[in-house]
Amino acid sequence: MTGQATSNAWSSHEGAAALAAPALTEKRRAFDWRILLGFFLPIAVALLWEGAVALGLAQGRLVPPPSRIIATLWGLAQTGELWTHTWMTLWRVLVGFVIGAVAGIVLGALSGSSKTTRQLLDPTLQALRAIPSIAWVPLFILWLGIFEASKVALIAVGVFFPVYLGIAGAILSVDRKLVEVGHVFRLSRVQLARRILLPAVLPEAVIALRSGLGLGFMFVVAAEFMGASEGLGYLLVDGQQMGKPDQILAAIIAFALLGKIADSLLVAGTKPLVRWQDTVRERL
Amino acid sequence: MLALEHLSKTYADGTRALSDINLTVHEGEIVSLIGGSGCGKTTLLRLIAGLDRASAGRIRLDDEVLTGPHPAVGIVFQEPRLLPWLSVSDNIAFGLDGVGAAEKKARVSHALSKVGLIEHADRWPRDLSGGQQQRVSIARAFVTNPKVLLLDEPFSALDAFTRASLHEHLLGLWEETRPTVVLVTHDVQEAVTLADRAIVMQPKPGRILDELPLTLSRPRDRTGLPFETSVRRILTALDHSLKAPQLQPQRERDRQAAALWW
């Protein structure tokens, strides 16, 4: 029959076209040198300032030239101080992040998946969210002391809310049409959660965790301001009190690098889970 | 045999989507529900699929009364509704939970070759065209060997060429196990191409207006005179369905007449 023959012709034609497509997209693109353009401005400013201080046009006492900042960083690394402080900060963020993220995921899942639990939990949590997290500091110090517990608690609170909101919102916005597919195949509640809800919320969950991690780094600074003897935040306070702007800037640079590395690790670690996403990213 | 008995559906807001539907579909029969938009075709399918509950009446499959999603009832939606995180073959295997690994693999690859997508087995749904995705969705419904297959305008979003090729794929799969098929469509040509019987529906509230047997031999020649005649008969019936006033019950007409009196 002609219909059958033509339909076969179509499918093989479509097949050929579809098979050819990835070869094109995966073709290695030439390195785009314009990416380096982004480095131009900061390096130019740094060199100008370095030159101005070297020529005696500026003192560079409160705004140290790049060479002094690098030297300070190098010195801190040499004595091992930098690693102690970095490790301390990292440890606090990590513990706080894990506690806050786990709590956020669990409560977010509870609140997203059932209307009853949402009506029970959400108003209270939204009210707590309206409190600026730093406002908890005095209370945490009274309750948990000035050592690690209060710091970790503050970071956990900071991480909790974006994760909670993100997870609950993601579950609420799962496509009803896909859930119906699960109903048609008679999935139980647990199966539905595992086979449809969980994969469907993963992309948004990753974003929620990333913003949680970002806030974790924000709150670790606040936590280390409230009386720490170690940590990059301590280096900041110490630099201020001892009048060492180069140390402050060195700590800021360390924070920037640390935050970026942690975020990249989180993205790289979760990438295999969201590979299937049909996003514009890969086509740009 | 699929039997709908006095089936009615009224939504919470008072909309009467279906009123007193009685329909018997024989085993292996392809029945096409046809009618304008808003006459409850999709609602009817959702009731049979167990995705919504009927307000009155019941649905029987052989001797069993259907009260929810049933393993012997499969459905292909208007959109492909593939799970984007599963590969094409995993999507097809989605409903094959209790089946052993070896048999699962065999059934999936058989279904894949039937819809002509065997070389796409390991790709993501996002890499497929709309027609290919809908073929995967048809394969997903067929692979569980349902007794009843519900098709909710599955080809409506596709162009005429793709649609014709999908009709072939569908009939090819149907030939194997000959399930009972209920096909919702608003495309008269499609109804005549596929169905053994066309049920013409009427809106507000949704009900059955007319039944037209389509006894043309398969495969059907879309250009022949008998095909044209059948298409015309259905179009005439559809015309009647839209000229609602003449067909409305006497009391309704009287009420309208009274309203227009002054």
Image (tube, coloured by chain):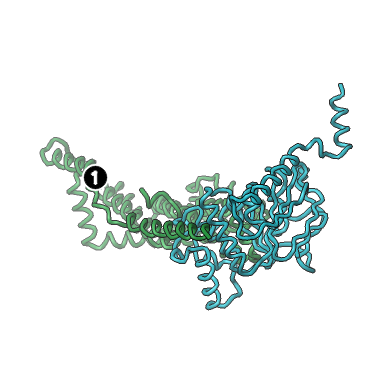
Chain colours: A green, B cyan
| Residue at the extreme top | B262
User: Does dot 1 land on a helix, a strand or a loop?
Assistant: helix
User: As rendered, which of A204 and B9 lies closer to the eye?
Assistant: B9
Write the residue at 51% across / 66% down: B112
User: Residue A147: horizontal and vertical position, in percent?
Assistant: 43, 60
Q: Is residue B101 visible?
A: yes
Picture layout, residue B248 above or below residue A94: above
Instruction: Please state the total of marks drawn on the protein image.
Output: 1
User: As rendered, which of B3 and A268 lies closer to the eye?
Assistant: B3
| Residue at the extreme front | B225
In the displayed structure, does residue B96 sit left or right of residue A217?
Answer: right
User: As rendered, which of B200 and A77 lies closer to the eye?
Assistant: B200
In the displayed structure, does residue A283 sit left or right of residue B134?
Answer: left
User: Residue A133: horizontal and vertical position, in percent?
Assistant: 49, 48
Picture layout, residue B143 above or below residue A109: below
Q: Is residue A145 visible?
A: no
User: Pointer 1 indicates a residue of which chain?
Assistant: A
Write the residue at 78% across / 65% down: B65
Picture layout, residue A168 above or below residue B38: below
User: As rendered, which of A265 and A45 lies closer to the eye?
Assistant: A265
User: Residue B246: horizontal and vertical position, in percent?
Assistant: 81, 36
Q: Which residue is mark 1?
A: A34
In the displayed structure, does residue A140 sit left or right of residue B21?
Answer: left
Check disc 1 and give the amino acid type: Arg
Q: Mark 1: give few (<14), some (14-19) or many (20+) Cα within 10 Å.
A: few
Residue A64 sits in quarter: top left
User: Residue A194: horizontal and vertical position, in percent?
Assistant: 57, 65
